[in-house]
Structure formats: structure tokens, C-alpha cells
Image (tube, rainbow, N blue to C red):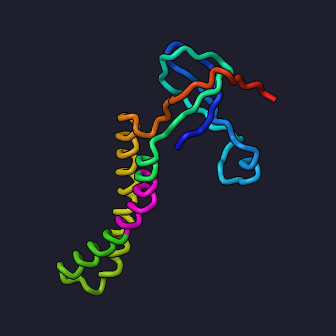
């Protein structure tokens, strides 16, 4: 996914950028916040505040992480229920099988969020979801309106 951004600050190798939004974005309401997406990027190229750049986030990893975040907890929830019911039957506690299933599914569901946190830190440490500057528009300078 490629988007245009404006350089806000340049401090050594760290560049602070803000994603530029189209006029249609203001009417959508899908994004939260004050309408600005601000990122810190490690960038060695000579940039100055006001420069327009193109940033890219790998689309494949973005889709993969979205699937993992939304689908993984649901799969784990159902798996936890099946395991809880199976354990109740294994221990001859069939009258409590539904209770075991519900408690087990909630435990598994909660654990899935801990695993997602580990997955997020792994993805972040590898730089998969970090935007990177792919192009600098030397002929364009952003002027705040």
C-alpha cells in the first residue's frame, strides 16, 4: 500500500512523517483520531520538513496481520470450547461439559490476545509493518493550509 506523506521533522536518521489524506477521507469517518496518521521512520536520505514523499507498507504483511488479528481469536475460542467439552467427557463429568467448554473457551480466548501481542512485537521487531520511504517528490513542497 502506497501513500503520499509530508515530512514533519528530521532528527538525525529519524524522520517524522504525516500521511496526506484525500478530501474524500474527511467524509468517510473510518479512521479514528484527529485525521492525521503520524509515523516515525528510520531514514538516512536528506529530507527536510515540508518535503513530500511516498511511503509504502507491505500489502502482503498488512493483509496477513489483519487476518491473524480478526480470525485467530475466533478459531481459538471455538477450539477452547471443543477442548473443554472433550476434557469434561474424558473425566466423566458430562453434566458439566458445557461449563467446562465455556470456561475453557474464555481462557483460550484470553490467551489468544497474549499470543497476538507476541506476534505483534515479532512483526514490529522485523520491520514488516513499518512504512518505508520509496520516493521523494523533489518538485513538490507541502504548505499547511
- The quarter of the rendered structure image containing the C terminus is top right
x 30%, y 81%: residue: 97
Q: Position of residue 57 (x, y in %)?
A: 49, 40
Along the viewing direction, whichever of 63 and 77 lies nearer the viewer: 63
Along the viewing direction, whichever of 112 and 104 lies nearer the viewer: 112
Q: In the shown orientation, is residue 96 left or right of residue 116?
A: left
Q: Position of residue 111 (x, y in %)?
A: 35, 56
Q: Which residues are magenta?
A: 65-77
49 part of magenta stretch: no
Which is the main secondary structure of the residues drawn in magenta?
Answer: helix
x 65%, y 22%: residue: 51
Q: Is residue 97 above or below residue 118?
A: below
Point out the residue furthest to the bottom here: 95
Q: In the shown orientation, is residue 62 left or right of residue 94?
A: right
Q: In the shown orientation, is residue 91 left or right of residue 144?
A: left
72 part of magenta stretch: yes
Q: Position of residue 98 (x, y in %)?
A: 34, 81
x 21%, y 82%: residue: 89
Amino acid at each position: 500500500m502506497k501513500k503520499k506523506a509530508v515530512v514533519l521533522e528530521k532528527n538525525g536518521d529519524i524522520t517524522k512523517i504525516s500521511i496526506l489524506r484525500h478530501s474524500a477521507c474527511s467524509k468517510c469517518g473510518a479512521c479514528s483520531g484527529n485525521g492525521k496518521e503520524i509515523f516515525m521512520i528510520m531514514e538516512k536520505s536528506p529530507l527536510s520538513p515540508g518535503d513530500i514523499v511516498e511511503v509504502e507498507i507491505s500489502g502482503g504483511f498488512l493483509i496477513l496481520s489483519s487476518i491473524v488479528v480478526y480470525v485467530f481469536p475466533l478459531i481459538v475460542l471455538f477450539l477452547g470450547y471443543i477442548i473443554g467439552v472433550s476434557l469434561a467427557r474424558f473425566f466423566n463429568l458430562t453434566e458439566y461439559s458445557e461449563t467446562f467448554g465455556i470456561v475453557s473457551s474464555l481462557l483460550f480466548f484470553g490467551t489468544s490476545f497474549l499470543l497476538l501481542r507476541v506476534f505483534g512485537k515479532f512483526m514490529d521487531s522485523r520491520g514488516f509493518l513499518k512504512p518505508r520511504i520509496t520516493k521523494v517528490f523533489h518538485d513538490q513542497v507541502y504548505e499547511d493550509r
